[in-house]
Image (cartoon, rainbow, N blue to C red):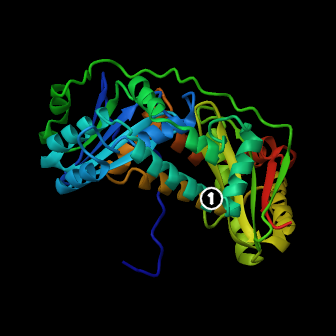
Amino acid sequence: MNRQIAPDIKTIKSIKTGFPLASGRMFFIPSDEGVFKLDIVFPKSGYGVTENKFISSYAVDLLLSGTANKSSSEIATEIDFHGGFVFKNSDFYTSSLTIYGMNEKFQILFELVKEYYENCIYSLDELNIFKERKISELNINLGKTSFLANRGINQLILGEDHPYSKPADQDIIRSIESSQLLDYKKNRLIEPYFIFTGSASTEAEKVIENLGYNLKTLVTGDLNEIIPQETAETEKKIIKQDSTQSSIRMGKIMPSREHEDYFKISMCNLILGGYFGSRLMKNIREEKGLTYGIHSSITPFKNFSLFKISSECNSDLSETVRQEIYNEIKILQTELVGQEELTTAKNYLSGHMMRNFDGAFNISDRFKGIMELDTKDPDAYYRNYFNTINKVTSEEIKEIANNYLNINTLKYCISGAN
């Protein structure tokens, strides 16, 4: 093998997702790594589809905070003694507990976690400690221009009352009561479905059924998603007088990932600012040295997606950075992307997706995300992904840039010194 000659690059035409099939509430992903991962997912319980996002988030964060007989430290010590780890998460659409541990410890760890989350009492002492920590985190974040700019742009794009952009303050944090968290647990953290990644010999389904869970009923969607209400305001400036750095955010609402243009938009986003070799990085950071970092991203929701450009720079250079971003967008709208650049972007995007399926735990993460968004045919989604990415042309990228990246439709927020 001649190491001075680069190997041929093969086009990835499809991917075998490894996603499980099920007719009920149990999904199995085989793994021979000796450890298991169990996602206990509560549908329709995320902070974006409940009445109060803060009650939702806090109730999940405090699920292992103590029962009538055991404190949070005693619970943590017992789970740790058996080699387990529990990750608690409240996403936009669902809430979940994820248990990690050795296969042979599955039953005892699942029994412990089940007992402790079902009998959680949200004690006043634990809740007050949690509130003080949240207030401390909030005060620290309010001193960061990046936090303020992110909050500002989300409010401009989605409206101030949308769950994704609704901000916390000390009054909101202090107002949460134990009774509200208990009601949420009783009414929302029910009828979970399970994604088990581990050895078939663990017999996870049998263990879960023996502990009283009905795994035969189907998981249904019908998410009551709140529609974003964009503000009439197009720009926002948040003054942070003691800051020498400014945080710039631009963005807008884009189509959902069920839309026929979504994958092309993803490719356009990648070329613009979606990876280290993107145009924003090369021009504004590497060549001109105007910014500490810059990138663009797309966050998918069920019925829309959120496009955002983020940059941090010296306050004196903020307007220059803004104009350079606009210039890069205009170039995409007026000039065709070169074939070498397009091929590099395609290979990067395909390779990045392949890495997302490297190993059983990664597969389970991808499957959990697909389930949250209620994609009807996950395998078809990824087939369409690779098919579109491989076939997209420079002309289509230019068309997408003109159709979706009109700079007059981009909201703009900057946080920094006046």
Q: Is residue 21 above or below residue 325?
A: above
Front one among 314 and 160: 160
> Residue at point 40% right, 80% down?
2
Front one among 11 and 347: 347
Query: Percent x, y for residue 134?
Result: 53, 52
Q: Is residue 218 above or below residue 349?
A: above
Q: Which residue ends up furthest to the front in the rendered image?
A: 125
Front one among 116 and 39: 116
Lateral position of residue 285 relative to residue 132, left or right: right
Say which amino acid is labelled 1. Asn
Locate the N terminus and report the quarter of the image it occupies: bottom left
Query: Percent x, y for residue 243?
Result: 75, 71
> Residue at point 85% right, 45% down?
234
Query: Percent x, y for residue 21?
Result: 31, 29
> Residue at point 44% right, 38% down?
59
Lateral position of residue 339 relative to residue 355, left or right: right
